[in-house]
Image: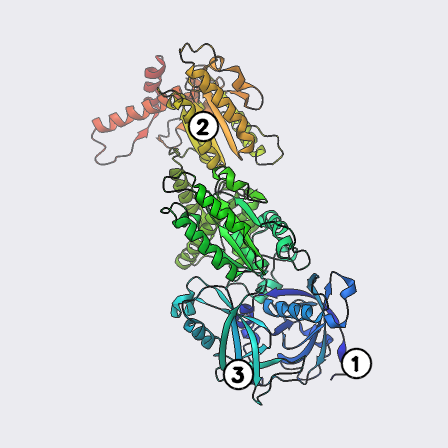
């Protein structure tokens, strides 16, 4: 044993990482001439060189890897249990690595889990919480070396149902091709990488398989007896025996398993959101939803809080639109608590032939007890109790309810159902859920967090200005969309750097093409009309209207509870109301639904109101969305004055008012109306809270606004040098609309094109260059004067 000086106890902050990182990330730090050098495995820890010396290591100070018996002292929640029996001692490999921060220790998740189990077994009462964020470490002995094992008895922790055990034999053969150090009673993980998945067809959908060491036999025929050194070296020459599968918790996971993460990125380049949270399985924007789910299920699984005496079935509901991240959240939740994740789509259970759905349900819950502790994910729960005709099947519901009530197991089983719309779930199934919550579409700030998180998990960092720009252009994108966007951005950057030898960083153009394609694809999927690409430069004048509309849209981004639901543009025909709406749709990165009033009206009773409901339902799905009502006076006239015998228009107006009142709970949906006759619109539509602000779009009555309009309209024309737009403006009437100026420019271009064709110049030079004489002729034809 070492002297008193060597028993120095040092307090470390703990970073627990998947064991796979110990097998890969530290490979460059290892040297090949160390005796009994293993490929690390789970029983290893990494620390800074200064802490290495501080702990009192005196032998092989030049070696990177050292064997030592190390004492781990964790804090527990109950001080009464704080005694020497709660300190775990273990022979481990200690690795020096300059990449690790001082007073920080990197430990595998398997080792943390095994130390916790050892502490619970040694304590008289194992029901307490252990603080695994920090640990007091001291070195007990440097003179202990593990010896080789001749016989190893293993048991697979039940995670999947394998058709045969030959696949496990092949996996273990590959795993022990490099010697590993294992301890009696430990749980260790075997990662199934892509190469192994190709060789072992049974592991196509499995990332990690867990085993428990049941028995170790040394070369002398004895089992390890020392409480500090219960381990042996296991390699290909050791005889492996596999016994029946066991049930139990798996090592909890705090960090996602991505090949691009490394010790360097986790310790030196870790973003702030990693340091402030004890897990990075999900993006920071998912934090509230993740904490809510943890709060729900902890009483059913936590060692010190578990509910066992009352009749409560842990079944919950999580709703959110497709791709928002429900499955990601539940997978992370199961990994965080060391539970198995099992996904059973209700579409494959419900709607079967008579009696088959009940048989499937019973088989699922029978198998579920063998997989416990387990989190059962039931997506599309609204389809579970439906028959082939999409009607509610009472017998299937009765069977499901019975299986939930009879679900009793030594190990916890959590059932979480998901749906895209909780209103589609029948009331009978809703009664079974203890809690329910919704995962909303991320806002701009949350999208920025998600994109930064995805790049971090791929070992990349992106400039904050680029992140903010991309987040502002991806309104309505959910987690799956952003995941695809980041993947395609890597592809675009690779092509750009390879072709032009540009700097190897991400820029906005790497995302722009993909964003436009995804916006177009989504608009087509929801049936939104194709909106011409109209920029603010195409809208001459109307500066105060542009600012007011943008101010209203931006104010709705803040969740203050005080939102403006819409604006009404009114004014004479041809002043640019529709053009302004198209520019808003093109430049604000919102989905755009354009409706002319008469399009919603139908000859059948009730169909017009149904069309209004469908329109607003589509807008809520497409949120953030702008709904533009052109010719609003034809859709919402004053009630009581329409003159139709059936009162159709009155009912349509009432339905429209009801839908607009519900927009406060619908996310980011903005109403934009346009009309020539605001006096014909029902006053209830114009009250505060609906279309609460009227913006007048009038003709251009000053020369500066007229110049702005004609400059915008001639921006894409080729003008001769004798054309001075300032002169053309002075020849216009005092009051002119945008449509009249557009007619002037079109007439001038047509006059020039006609002249080019008559002179035969179009064969040699097809360019149409408009000169001053063409504008003067157009002025005479459009306004009837020189």
Which tag is nearer the camera, tag 3 or tag 2? 3
Badge 1 local density, few (<14 within 10 Å), some, or many (20+)?
few
- Give the residue pinned by disc 3: 151
Mark 3 vs mark 2: which is more N-terminal? 3
**Nearer-the-camera pick, 125 or 546:** 125
Name the residue: 60% across, 36% down. 558
- Give the residue pinned by disc 1: 4
Q: Is residue 463 above or below residue 33?
A: above
Question: In whole angstroms, how far apart are the C-alphas of marks 1 and 3?
Answer: 37 Å
Name the residue: 50% across, 15% down. 682
Mark 2 vs mark 1: which is more N-terminal? 1
Q: Position of residue 612 (x, y in %)?
A: 43, 26
Badge 2 local density, few (<14 within 10 Å), some, or many (20+)?
some
Answer left or right for 85 relative to 110: right
Badge 3 local density, few (<14 within 10 Å), some, or many (20+)?
many
Q: Position of residue 584 (x, y in %)?
A: 47, 31
Q: Is residue 589 visible?
A: no
Answer left or right for 5 relative to 30: right
| SS at badge 1 | helix
């Amino acid at each position: 044993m070492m002297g008193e000086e060597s028993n120095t106890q040092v307090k470390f902050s703990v970073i627990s990482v998947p064991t796979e990182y110990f097998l890969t990330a530290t490979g460059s730090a290892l040297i090949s001439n160390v005796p009994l050098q293993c490929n690390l495995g789970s029983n290893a820890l990494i620390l800074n060189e200064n802490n290495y010396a501080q702990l009192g290591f005196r032998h092989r100070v030049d070696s990177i890897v050292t064997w030592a018996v190390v004492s781990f002292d964790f804090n527990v929640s109950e001080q009464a249990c704080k005694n020497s029996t709660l300190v775990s001692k273990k022979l481990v490999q200690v690795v020096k690595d300059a990449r690790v921060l001082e007073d920080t220790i990197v430990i595998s998740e398997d080792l943390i889990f095994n130390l916790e189990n050892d502490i619970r077994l040694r304590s008289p009462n194992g029901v307490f919480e252990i603080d695994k964020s920090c640990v007091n470490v001291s070195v007990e002995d440097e003179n202990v070396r593990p010896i080789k094992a001749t016989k190893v008895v293993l048991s697979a922790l039940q995670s999947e149902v394998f058709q045969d055990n030959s696949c496990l034999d092949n996996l273990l053969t590959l795993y022990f091709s490099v010697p590993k150090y294992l301890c009696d009673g430990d749980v260790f993980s075997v990662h199934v990488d892509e190469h192994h998945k190709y060789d072992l067809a049974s592991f196509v959908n499995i990332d990690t398989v867990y085993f428990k060491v049941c028995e170790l036999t040394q070369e002398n025929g004895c089992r390890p007896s020392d409480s500090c050194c219960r381990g042996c070296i296991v390699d290909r020459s050791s005889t492996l025996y596999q016994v029946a599968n066991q049930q139990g918790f798996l090592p909890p996971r705090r960090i996602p398993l991505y090949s691009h993460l490394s010790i360097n990125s986790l310790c030196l380049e870790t973003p702030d959101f990693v340091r402030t949270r004890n897990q990075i399985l999900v993006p920071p924007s998912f934090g509230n939803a993740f904490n809510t789910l943890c709060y729900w299920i902890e009483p059913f699984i936590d060692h010190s809080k578990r509910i066992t005496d009352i009749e409560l079935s842990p079944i919950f509901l999580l709703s959110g639109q497709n791709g928002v991240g429900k499955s990601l959240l539940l997978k992370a939740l199961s990994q965080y608590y060391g539970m198995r994740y099992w996904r059973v789509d209700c579409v494959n259970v419900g709607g079967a032939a008579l009696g088959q759905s009940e048989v499937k349900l019973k088989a699922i819950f029978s198998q579920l007890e063998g997989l416990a502790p387990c989190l059962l994910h039931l997506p599309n729960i609204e389809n579970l109790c439906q028959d082939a005709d999409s009607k509610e099947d009472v017998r299937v519901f009765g069977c499901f309810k019975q299986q939930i009530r009879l679900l009793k197991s030594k190990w916890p089983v959590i059932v979480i159902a998901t749906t895209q719309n909780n209103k589609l779930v029948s009331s009978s199934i809703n009664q079974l859920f203890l809690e329910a919550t919704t995962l909303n579409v991320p806002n701009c700030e949350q999208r920025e967090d998600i994109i930064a998180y995805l790049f971090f998990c791929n070992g990349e960092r992106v400039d904050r200005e680029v992140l903010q720009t991309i987040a502002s252009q991806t309104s309505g994108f959910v987690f799956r969309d952003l995941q695809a966007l980041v993947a395609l951005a890597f592809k675009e950057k690779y092509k750009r750097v390879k072709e032009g030898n540009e700097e190897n960083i991400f820029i906005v153009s790497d995302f722009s093409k993909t964003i436009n394609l995804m916006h177009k694809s989504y608009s087509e999927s929801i049936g939104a009309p194709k909106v011409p690409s109209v920029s603010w430069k195409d809208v001459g004048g109307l500066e105060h209207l542009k600012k007011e509309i943008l101010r209203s849209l931006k104010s709705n981004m803040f969740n203050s509870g005080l939102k403006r639901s819409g604006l009404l543009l009114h004014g004479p025909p041809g002043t640019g109301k529709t053009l302004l709406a198209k520019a808003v749709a093109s430049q604000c990165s919102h989905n755009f639904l354009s409706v002319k009033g008469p399009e919603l009206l139908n000859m059948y009773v009730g169909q017009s109101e149904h069309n209004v409901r469908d329109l607003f339902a589509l807008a809520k799905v497409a949120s953030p969305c702008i709904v533009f009502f052109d010719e609003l006076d034809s859709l919402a006239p004053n009630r009581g004055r329409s003159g139709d015998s059936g009162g159709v228009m009155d009912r349509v107006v009432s339905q429209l008012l009801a839908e607009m009142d519900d927009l406060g709970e619908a996310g980011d949906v903005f109403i934009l109306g346009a009309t020539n006759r605001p006096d014909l619109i029902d006053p209830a539509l114009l009250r505060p809270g609906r279309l609460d602000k009227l913006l007048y779009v009038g003709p251009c009555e000053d020369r500066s606004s007229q110049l702005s309009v004609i400059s915008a309209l001639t921006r894409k024309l080729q003008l001769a040098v004798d054309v001075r737009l300032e002169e053309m403006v002075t020849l216009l009437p005092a009051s002119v609309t945008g449509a009249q100026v557009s007619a002037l420019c079109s007439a001038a271009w047509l006059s020039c094109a006609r002249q080019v064709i008559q002179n035969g110049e179009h064969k040699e030079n097809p360019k149409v260059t408009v000169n001053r004489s063409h504008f003067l002729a157009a002025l005479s034809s459009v306004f009837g004067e020189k």
